[in-house]
Image (cartoon, grey):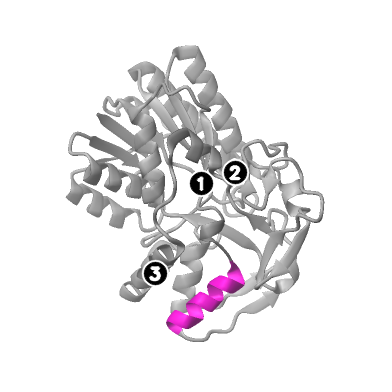
Amino acid sequence: MKILISGVCGFAGSALARHFIETDSGIEVLGFDNFIRAGSETNRRNLQALGVKVSHADLRVQSDVDALPDADWVVDAAANASVLAGVDGRTSSRQIIEHNLGGTVQMLEYCKAHRAGFVLLSTSRVYSIAPLASLPMRSEADAFFPDENGTLPHGVSAGGVAEDFSTEPPLSLYGSTKLCSERLALEYGSAFGLPVWINRCGVLAGAGQFGRADQGIFSFWIHSWARRRALKYIGFGGTGHQVRDCLHPRDLARLVLAQMRDPHRAVSRVQNVGGGTARAMSLRQLSAWCSRHFGAHDVAADTAERAFDIPWMVMDSRLAARQWQWEPEISLEEILGGIAAHASANPEWLEISG
C-alpha cells in the first residue's frame, strides 16, 4: 500500500508517516511539504532516514500536484491550523482559504485521477463558537466543567462535544475552511466512488511539536515554562481555568491505518478523534504540572476576551470507539512527559519552531 501525506513535515504528518513505516513493512510512505514552517527541515531529515520519500511541493500549485507520484491513499494533513489565521494581521483571509480549502480540492482531484482513497484530518473547530462560548460552566479543582444543572445544548455532555453538535457559523475562517473541506470530500467520495474518512481531531500534542500558542498550546506552554518565558492566562477572568483535551498523533495514526485497511466499512464517515476527559486539563492545571517538573514560574493574568476563545473543549470520541473499537492508548502523563523531555533536550526549540 502506498500512502501519500500532504504536509508530511508538520507535526501530525510526520508522526503519521513514522507510525505507518514502523507498523507495517508493506507500506510505502510518500509525502510532500512546502517547508514554509520553521522546523520542517528537521522533520524532513528524520523522515528521509526512515525511508520516507519526501518531495517539495505546494498543494495550491496545480503543476506541483500533477507531478506527485501514484498512491493508493492520500492523508490530507496540510493546513494552516490557527484559529486566528486570516484575521491576525499576519496571514490574509485569501491565503487561508486557498491553502486549507483550495488545497483540499487539489488533493481530491488527485484522488479522482489516481482512484485513491482520501483521509481528511479535520478539527474540533468546525463546531459553533457561540454555543460553546456560552456553555454553563462550573469551576472545580482549577478547571472549568460543563454544569449539568444548567441547560446544555444538544451534542454536549460531561463526556465532551459530539459529532451532532452545531456547526453553524461563526466558526472562524479556519473552522469554516475545514468544514467546507469535509463536505467536498464527502461529495467527491459519493460522486466518484472514492473511500473517504474524516477525522475531527482535538488538540494533537507530543514531543517535537512546533511551539506555537495558537496551534500547539501544550507544547508551547511546557517549552515556555522550561525556558522561563513570559506566559499569561488570557480571558475568562485571567484564572487559566479553560480546558482542552489532547491526543498523541500515534493514537490517531492507529485509527487512520484501520480506516485505510477497511475502506468500505458501513459506518459513519465522520468521527471525532480526541483524548477525551482522561486527557483533559486546564492551563492552570498544566502550570501546576510544569511547576512540579521545572520549578515555580509566574504566570500573568489578562482578562481581555478574544473572539474565538472558548472555556471548555473536550472531544467526545465514543462514536469512533463504537465504529472502530478504538481508544487512545498514550496517557496524558506520557504526552506531557515526552514534551518535557524534549524541552530539556532541545532548549532552542521555541526559536527553531515558533
Q: Check if residue 283 falls in the magenta segment.
A: yes
- Please tell me how crowded label 1 is: few (under 14), some (14-19), or many (20+) other residues with Cα within 10 Å: some
Q: Amino acid at mark 3?
A: Gly
SS class of the residue under badge 3? Answer: helix
Give whichever of discs 3 and 2 has the lower sequence position.
2
Whole-percent x, y for residue 32 in the image: 32, 39
Q: Is residue 281 left or right of residue 37?
A: right
Tell whether position 30 is magenta: no
Mark toward the viewer: 3 or 2: 3
Amino acid under disc 2:
Tyr
Front-lying residue, 205 or 162? 162
Q: Earlier in the sequence, mark 3 or mark 1?
A: 1
The reply to whether residue 235 is visible in this rendering is no
Q: Is there a contact, CB below 8 Å, between mark 1 and mark 2?
A: yes
Region in magenta: 282-294
* Local SS, label 2: helix
Q: Which residue is mark 3?
A: 337
Q: Residue at x 24, y 43 (%)?
A: 23
Residue for badge 2: 174
